[in-house]
Image (cartoon, helix red, strand yellow):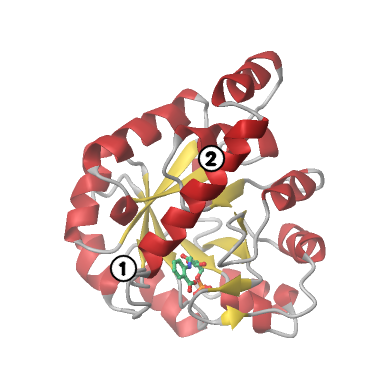
Amino acid sequence: MILEKIINKTIEDLNLRKQTISLEELELKIKEGSYKTKDVKSFLKSSKDEPIRIIAEVKKASPSKGIIKENFDPISIAKEYNDNGANAISVLTESHFFLGDLNYLKEIKKFTNIPLLRKDFIVDKYQIAEALVYGADFVLLIAKALNQDELNSLYSYARSLDLEVLVEIHDLEDLEKSLKCGADIIGINHRNLKTFEMDMTLCDKLIPLIPRDKIIVAESGVSDIEVIKRLHGIGADSFLIGEHFMRVPSIKNELLKFKNSWK
Ligand SMILES: O=C(O)c1ccccc1NCC(=O)[C@H](O)[C@H](O)COP(=O)(O)O
């Protein structure tokens, strides 16, 4: 199963990185440094002035599609996102299956004025401390990859560092877990991470069950202005879009089109 495979590899890598710098050392760095995070919720919550919020992803490859973007330049992609109305940038940092890199976060942080998401398979506090040190403003926690205690503990740890958390769900059981851990930002991933199957009707089933004060992010498979309009109409605040932006001739045009789709 792909999710298990990714997580096993993640843990292997993590154990290697811990030999170079320990969690205690990372935490000391955080204590002695000045790592200020942005107010992520204000960037992701739909408002009258700006109803459609976009989290644009820097994504070279994926387990379901293989290489998505040849001649991948994460810096110029992130610049285009930052300069053309994206509300946040999702930076894939997983290196084996998505060909991401933690250093992309650090580099992208230097010139962006919108929040950065560390998009990875987080199973350990260590990755959360790393996320802050490398420049993230928020982290992804995947409900399907964690039991309730793990989710609660990683969530609290992230919040204790002032990192916001996007809790990703795919079904009712995940939704219950996300609410129990106190998530304020809930991502509904249309993609089943175990089978890669897409269910673009998932928001219709899950959004009505989510308290109205939560920020809702529709994730994966979004490439169409009609889908954005429809999902916004039923309550989605933000849209996490990766592959589509990697394939279009002009990210700028596509971002503008999506952001204005409510008009
Ligand atoms: O993208 C995949 O194939 C994938 C496979 C297994 C686990 C996670 C996966 N993707 C992570 C994501 O959630 C997406 O990168 C993100 O939602 C953007 O999706 P898309 O717009 O479809 O690229």
Identify which residue is drawn at 74% across, 44% down: 106
The CA distance from mark 1 to mark 2 is 43 Å
Q: In this picture, is 1 found above or below 51? A: below
Residue 260 coordinates in the image, percent (x, y): 59, 72
Look at mark 1 in the image and give the residue it sits on. Answer: 234
Q: Is residue 197 above or below residue 74?
A: below
* Secondary structure of the residue carrying numbered label 2: helix
Q: Image quarter for residue 144?
A: bottom left
The image position of residue 79, as x and y in percent, is 79, 60
Is the N terminus in the top left, top right, bottom left or bottom right quadrant?
bottom left
Q: Amino acid under label 2? A: Asn
Report the side of 40 relative to 36 (left or right). left
Amino acid at circle 1: Ile
Residue 89 located left or right of residue 179 = right
Instruction: Using the image, determine if residue 230 lies above or below residue 175.
Output: below
In the rendered image, which quarter is residue 154 located in? top left
- Which secondary structure lies at badge 1? loop
Q: Position of residue 63 (x, y in %)?
A: 50, 74
Q: Residue at x 67, y 26 (%)?
A: 35
Task: Decide if residue 184 is on the left or right side of residue 127.
Answer: left
Between label 1 and label 2, give the one nearer the viewer. Answer: 2
- Closest to the observer: 61 or 5? 5
Residue 232 locus on image (x, y percent) = 40, 68
